[in-house]
Image (spheres, helix red, strand yellow):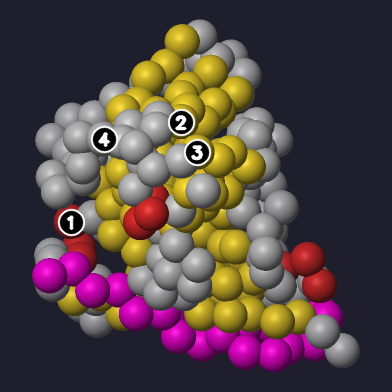
Amino acid sequence: EVHLVESGGGLVQPGGSLRLSCAASGFTFSTYWMHWVRQAPGKGLVWVSRMNSDGSDRSYADSVKGRFTISRDNAKNTLYLQMNSLRAEDTAVYFCARAQDFGSGNYRYFDSWGQGTLVTVSS
Amino acid sequence: QSALAQPASVSGSPGQSITISCTGTSSDVGSYNFVSWYQQHPGKAPKLIIYEGTKRPSGVSNRFFGSKSGNTASLTISGLQAEDEADYYCCSYAGSNTWVFGGGTKLTVL
């Protein structure tokens, strides 16, 4: 069974930094693209970032580009999100999600999600 | 990248059908057949219920039906059940390895 567990969230002051982790199990982590998606309290889902399977390619939403860095350690089956220069509007539950292609070769869907970790940016 | 447009809320009685629309642009929904839908119950992680616009992952009820025309995708839920009460989000690939979600629709089963 696919299992994704996020950690590292907490309270941080504006301008501060935080690193989130997503521990994966139940599947061959090194063969899947992975994503971060966030959800502000009471709001909708927002795509944040994506990394390909070997870590050679990454992409970001405009709202976090230049401040957030996605990375992964396939030996540890772990995905990371380094968040710098945090703002109040970054306050959200951060989910990691596995990308799925359903055999098409197009990894465009999020088929497994963690339970999320809450990041609160406030002074 | 602007969020896809969804109605804030829809409602229906048990046994009825409802449809949730998801309107994007020619840069996302209109350009790609990579629309997906997610169901999210309060305090829970989202669950994939439709991918590639019309297909259901294994284990998802056939009461969920997806479609797309032009820049608008739709999710229809037939035979409404109490357990269907949740938030529903559409999502589209938007090119250059970026994705965009809809604002979400709260479904109330009356």
Classify residue A16 as left or right of residue A55: right
Report which residue position mark 4 lands on: B63
Residue type at mark 1: give it: Thr
Residue B6 falls within the magenta-colored stretch: no
Residue type at mark 4: give it: Arg
Q: Which of A59 and A109 is in front in this view?
A: A109
Residue A2 falls within the magenta-colored stretch: yes
The answer to whether the residues at label 2 and label 1 have Cβ atoms under 8 Å apart is no
Report which residue position mark 1 lands on: A31
Q: Start and end of the magenta stretch?
A: A1-21
Viewer-nearest of discs 2 and 3? 3
Classify residue A90 as left or right of residue A72: right
Q: In this view, does A25 lie above or below B26?
A: below
Q: Which mark is residue B18?
A: 2
Residue A70 image point, x, y percent = 49, 65
Q: Mark 2 belongs to which subunit?
A: B
State the CA–CA distance, disc 1 to disc 3. 42 Å
The answer to whether residue B55 is visible is: yes
The answer to whether the residues at label 2 and label 3 have Cβ atoms under 8 Å apart is yes
Q: Share a chain, discs 2 and 1?
A: no
Determine the residue positioned at 18% across, 30% down. A104
Which element type, helix, strand or loop, lies under badge 4? Answer: loop
Query: Mark 4 or mark 2, which is nearer the start of the sequence?
Result: 2
Q: In this view, does B29 lie above or below A92?
A: above
Residue type at mark 2: give it: Ile
Residue A98 image point, x, y percent = 31, 57
Q: Mark 3 belongs to which subunit?
A: B
Which element type, helix, strand or loop, lies under badge 3? Answer: strand
Determine the residue positioned at 21% across, 45% down. B60
Q: Share a chain, discs 4 and 1?
A: no
Query: Mark 3 or mark 2, which is nearer the start of the sequence?
Result: 3
